[in-house]
């Protein structure tokens, strides 16, 4: 299963009911997991604003309640279509095949692909939206506020081996 720790952390920081946080996490996990199993990419635009953002795409006349298994399965299938799934804080799918657009932002990387860069641009303009990007050749990315959220530690040891630190007197002599 893909690691969605960044999504979980972003949801915890929000001022929403815990049942909404849990529901959104479960829905995202199910859709992302299915996309990974079926080996296709997808994007989820999780809209947490008081008023949903208007995103160009295939709007559903009646939104789908993603807490219902048959609606969730349909959303998992729709995730294969190019464009993002638009999921609201009401735990419903409002649109699919959505175009996430926006102005260029720092941190774009053409090597990461259109889904990733579109998510950076869109979330920079819409901070109330978290986008989860599944790529067929990279790990899952969680993007909010025009930035990829990451829990990876980039620390690298500078040690070259198992050397013993110098004594204080030797260190003082070396620093003259």
Image: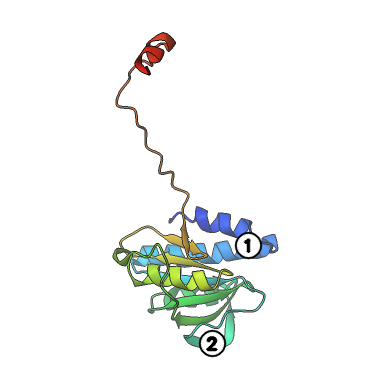
**88 or 56, which lies in front?**
56
Residue located 50% across and 69% down the image: 124
Name the spot of residue 112 as percent of width and height, x first: 33, 64
Q: In the rendered image, is residue 53 in sight?
A: yes
| Colouring style | rainbow
Q: Which residue is mark 1?
A: 21
Label 1: how many Cα within 10 Å (few below 14, some 14–19, many 20+): many
136 vs 154: above or below: below
Quadrant of the image containing the C terminus: top left
Q: Which secondary structure lies at badge 1?
A: helix
Label 2 to label 1, Cα distance in Å?
23 Å
Dividing the picture into quadrants, the one containing residue 173 is top left
Name the spot of residue 151 as percent of width and height, x first: 47, 49
- Is 121 placed left or right of 46 in the picture? left
Residue located 39% across and 15% down the image: 171
Q: Tags 2 and 1 in contact by the CB under 8 Å rule?
A: no
Residue placed farthest to the front in the image?
A: 176
Tally of numbered discs: 2
Dividing the picture into quadrants, the one containing residue 137 is bottom left
Q: Mark 2 vs mark 1: which is more N-terminal? A: 1
Label 2: how many Cα within 10 Å (few below 14, some 14–19, many 20+): few
Q: Which residue is mark 2?
A: 60
Quadrant of the image containing the N terminus: bottom left
């Amino acid at each position: 299963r893909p690691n969605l720790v960044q999504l979980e952390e972003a949801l915890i920081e929000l001022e929403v009911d815990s049942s909404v946080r849990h529901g959104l996490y479960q829905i995202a996990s199910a859709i992302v997991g299915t996309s990974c199993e079926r080996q296709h990419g997808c994007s989820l635009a999780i809209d947490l604003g008081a008023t949903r953002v208007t995103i160009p795409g295939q709007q559903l006349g009646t939104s789908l309640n993603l807490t219902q298994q048959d609606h969730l399965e349909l959303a998992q299938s729709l995730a294969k279509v190019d464009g993002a799934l638009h999921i609201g804080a009401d735990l419903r799918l409002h649109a699919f095949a959505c175009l996430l657009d926006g102005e260029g932002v720092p941190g774009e990387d053409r090597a990461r692909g259109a889904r990733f860069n579109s998510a950076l641009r869109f979330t920079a303009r819409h901070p109330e939206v978290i986008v989860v990007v599944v790529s067929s050749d990279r790990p899952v990315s969680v993007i909010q506020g025009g930035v990829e959220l990451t829990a990876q530690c980039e620390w690298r040891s500078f040690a070259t081996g198992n050397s013993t630190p110098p004594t204080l007197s030797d260190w003082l002599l070396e620093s003259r």
